[in-house]
Image (cartoon, helix red, strand yellow):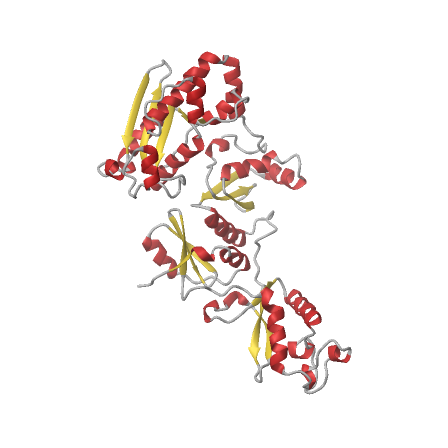
Amino acid sequence: MRPLAFVDLETTGATATIDRITEIGIVEVDTDGTVREWQQLVNPGTRIPPFIEQLTGISNAMVADAPPFEAVAADVLQRLQGRLFIAHNARFDYGFLKNEFKRLDITFRAPVLCTVKLSRTLFPEHKRHNLDSLIERHGLAAEARHRALADAQLIHQFWQKIHVDRSTADIDAALQAQNARPSLPPHLDAGIVDELPDTPGVYLFYGNNNLPLYIGKAKDIRQRVLSHFAADHKSAKEMALSQQVKRIDWIETAGEIGALLKEAALVKEMLPSQNRQLRKNDDVCTWTLIDEGEGWLRPELTSPRDFDFSIRSSCYGLFKSSKEATDVLRSLATEHNLCDALLGLEKTAPGKPCFAHQIKRCKGACVGNEPYAKHTMRLVGALTRLKLATWPVNGPAFIREGDEVHLVDGWRYLGTAKREDELHALLDNVRPPFDRDTYKILAKFVSRMTPLRLP
């Protein structure tokens, strides 16, 4: 039997990238059967919400004089090193410890076993597999539920109980099912499975050189990467890609927003051969309205790459080419009986009717039969559904996500920072041009933007 560590944590909340650990409980079991137990309160550096205090019995007063995680990190690492990490809903506890170590620039990895999954495999006839259900079902002795060491002891008891009640063959089969190795490309090191993090971020597939074949984003990098290879027998594209992959890199982010922004930026920078979306859009264009006087607003095709969205001018649509933009405007002209001459779609002499007026589609703004202002009102109404969102603040803004801050300005992504000095350093960089994909990402998260107060 390999050395084991039964682990349970109490925390300030459920999100590993934001919330912090308040208590750690570890039951170590050596190969000779020796058992050691360890428990430590941890000062999370933030307030414990009232409902968490009620649930765990751990109050802000109790952790006020407790050491921070950085003070006990070495001890925790020493107790877990070389052991099978066993926890109930292991993704939760393992994720919190990985994030705490990451804040200290320590990479923590361990083989993991989840007793929730183990219980489901061994006892499929039961619907519930939470710790309270296991206590009731297997007669486990619970001294202080929702305290770290007490819950770690319960997990250890469950482990002992199944080794009495179930055969070794059943347990080995359940363990093998949980830790089954996925199929991998032939040229890829199998050890990568243990390295892949189960956190949000961006992953990069490489072939024979340093130019990536493919860049993707994920809420769970490990799960998403392995899904590419699990599907290689269903998709010709996945099969072709998997045969070429020889190396995988990844960049972890605090959440989905960071992953989306990083993916869009890297695809444009590195131009991976297998990415069809998010490529450079240098030719992207939009319609703006130019005031020609007398109530006449004329649409003009503009590149938004250097457009200053802070001046509150309106833009309508993001198009891949001038042809696409013109085709859309022609369609709107037909649908709303607009004048091709006033729209700039047709050249006519002043006072002469456009072709659309001759076939009774234009209402005659070109020959004075309709006031310019009325024509403009119908034009603006037709364009409304294409209107781009106006930059919502004066100057740059940031989006906080976990321990990261994404800095944006005029729909342009300036970068991500974790410290204030990094944040202000981003303001000194050359502002990137407007990017269609970045705009589409940021427009979904306007409600999370906070104006950056500059000194």
| Towards the viewer: 143 or 12 | 143
| Residue 3 in sight here | no
Question: With respect to residue 345, does 74 lie above or below?
Answer: above
Q: Nearer the viewer, residue 394 or 270?
A: 394
Which residue shows up at 64% across the image and 37% down it? Answer: 239
* For residue 346, side relative to residue 426 (left or right): right
Determine the residue positioned at 45% across, 14% down: 163
Which x, y percent locates residue 315? Answer: 55, 68
Q: Position of residue 66 (x, y in %)?
A: 24, 35
Question: Relative to 368, is 402 above or below?
Answer: above
User: How far from the left and from the top, in percent, is residue 411?
Assistant: 48, 61
Q: Position of residue 352 (x, y in %)?
A: 72, 86
Q: Residue at x 36, y 14 (%)?
A: 33
Residue 182, by quadrant, is: top right
Name the image quarter holding residue 27.
top left
Judge from the rendering whether residue 371 lies leftward or rightward of residue 80; answer left or right.
right
Q: Quadrant of the C terminus?
A: bottom left
Of all residues, the one furthest to the left in this rendering is: 65
Is residue 374 toward the left or the right of residue 150 in the image? right
Q: Nearer the viewer, residue 360 or 262?
A: 360
